[in-house]
Structures are given as structure tokens and as C-alpha cells.
Amino acid sequence: MGNPNHATGQDQDAAEPAAAGANVPGLTTTKAPFIEQARANGEMYIHQPYELYSEENHQTWRQLFARMQDRWRRYANEKYLHGLDTLFMDHEHVPRFEDVNRFMQTLTGFRARPVSGYVPSYVFFDCLRRREFPTTVTIRDGKRLEYLPEPDIFHDIAGHVPMHTDRAFADALVRFGECARTAATLASAIPDEPERIRRLTSNIRAMARFFWFTVEFGLMRERPGSDALRVYGSGLLSSYGEIAHAIDAPAVQRYPFQIEWVVNQHFEIHHYQPLLFIVDSFDHLYKLVDELEDWIRRGKLDNVAPGEPLVSEADLRSFLEAGASE
């Protein structure tokens, strides 16, 4: 499914960043032996092996963070900017998760939890319910700053995590997790297996689309009733090119959020988004997630439009296993 599964790193004591330099293998996305070994061992939850970051990794972080400063001040919503300032995020070195969590947990109870990569959908949503955000520890190749073969630590920590310092937004994420539990529980009560799988697949696809057009690529009014827009979706907040494109490009279609449209709207992940949806505030987003759960309970998501994102066998199995254990 166009995964909301964003992996992250975790906490571990290690050498100071300046010492974590030249002669280490590095934690570059798709090129990190540590991650390859963790995956081979079937380890989803890991620690953040801070001593493995190379000087090139830290330099990549510095470049990404520096070039986004003007973009964020111009296009990001004020809650994100406040969160960025509140976290005292390191501009010069890849952040330590323990430092990020120390500030974030006192505000909303959320913490970044490092993972080795893909997290099955139900597991991801249930982490949100427990106020944990699966986060990757690797960082993109510094030679190709705009190319992101999979979520990296800049997307997760600089794109997502500042939003987690806002209580209304954090509570909305928790409600996503509760929606997933509701979907799994209701599906487990359907005796006919093909029908159970059909309905659950539709529900998962609807939730993935909702998450994509809000948490990943959402726009928000600068103030309720205003025509001025700001970005709150992490996929936009972590992209130098698309954050400006989302607000300024005449070709982008921008519409007020309509749940009946969003849950039936397919999306593609390999180009700038041509269609975006607008919420009024994070309180509005929370109410929309409430509505999403109501639609799950009433069966209104049992027959959403087919198409992207595809629901993988692992995603489906994660929901079926969760429902069976309730």
C-alpha cells in the first residue's frame, strides 16, 4: 500500500559526531550493511547505531537541513515551525533519537522508534496508537539529494517529527491507530473468509489514501477561512522541490478535504502530486479521523474504488492477525 510505514532509528550511546567520521561503513539508504543484517535476521525494531554514521552521512544531513530553512519559513505551517524550534534539532549532525525523544515525549508522549525498514500496515498504525513513530536510521545518498528510494531519517525526523510536538496533531495520529484496530476487530467477526478479506482490503486501501492525503501530503489554511495555504504533510516538508510546487504551481489542484473523495482517490508515489487536499486546522483533522472511524463502523469503506495503493499480502496479514488476537 503506498506505505505510511516510515522507519526510524533509535537510542544508543555512541561516540561524538565529530569522531564518527571517516573509517566507518556508514548508514546510507540501500547501502548499509547494518540494516541488511538486521533485515536478514528478521529484526524490525532496532537501535540507532550512531557510531556507524560516516562524515558523509553527517554532511548530507547538513546540506538537507540548511537548504530547507528558507523553504520551511516560507511554506510550512506555524505548528511545524514551532515544533522544529522546540526540538532544538541538530543542524550539523544526524540527530540522536534519544535527544529528539527527550523533548518530544514531554510534550505529547510520542517517541521515535527505530526500525530496519518496512513495517506492516497494522503494526505501523498500532505504533501510532501507542504514541510510537516507526523511524528509519539511514540517510539518503548525498550525491542525489532529491532521490529517495525509500523513506530516510531526514524525511522521518525533519519531515514528520516536528509535527508530533503538537498535541492536536499527535492525538489525530493516535486516532489513526484506533481506526486500524476497529477495522481489524470488525473484520474478524465476518465468518466468510473471502468476504472478510475483500472488506478488509477495501478498508486498508481507504485508510492508506486518507493518511497519504493528510499526514504525508496535506495542506492547511494559514487561518480558518483564509485562502492562504501552508504545508503540514511530511512528504512535502522534507522535499526541497515539492514543498514550493505544492503551494505555488498553477497545475496543482487543491480542494477542501472531502472524505468521500479522498478514500476513493488513487495516488502515485514517483512524481510530484497533482492533487492535494486542504484542512482548516489540526482540530479539523482530528474530527476527520473521527469521521473515518465512523465510516469504518458503518461499512462505508467496504467498497472503495480499486486501484493504487495496492494492499500487500503482508499488510493484509497484519490486520487479520490483529483481529484474530482481539
Image (tube, rainbow, N blue to C red):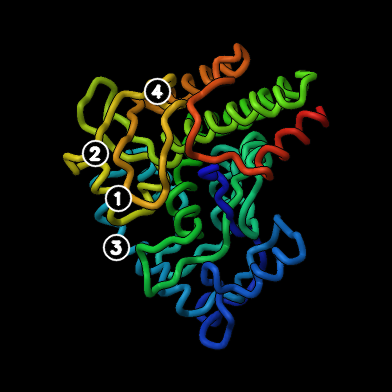
Q: Earlier in the sequence, mark 1 or mark 2?
A: 1
Image disc number at residue 67? 3
**Element under disc 4:** helix
Residue found at x 29% / y 48%: 243
| Viewer-proximal residue among 6 and 191 | 191
Image disc number at residue 252? 2
> Nearer the observer, disc 3 or disc 1?
1
Please name the residue that numbered disc 1 is placed on: 242
Q: How many labels does the image show?
A: 4
Q: Which of marks 3 and 1 is nearer the N terminus?
A: 3
Residue type (three-letter) at the residue carrying disc 3: Arg
Neighbour tally class for label 4: few under 14, some 14-19, many 20 plus, Cα within 10 Å: some
Please name the residue that numbered disc 4 is placed on: 261
Residue at mark 1 to residue at mark 2: CA–CA distance: 11 Å
**211 versus 83 height, above or below:** above
| Viewer-proximal residue among 168 and 237 | 237
Residue at mark 2 to residue at mark 4: CA–CA distance: 17 Å
Does 318 sit left or right of 289 as displayed? right
Residue 319's x, y, as percent?
Answer: 70, 34
Q: Which of marks 4 and 3 is nearer the N terminus?
A: 3
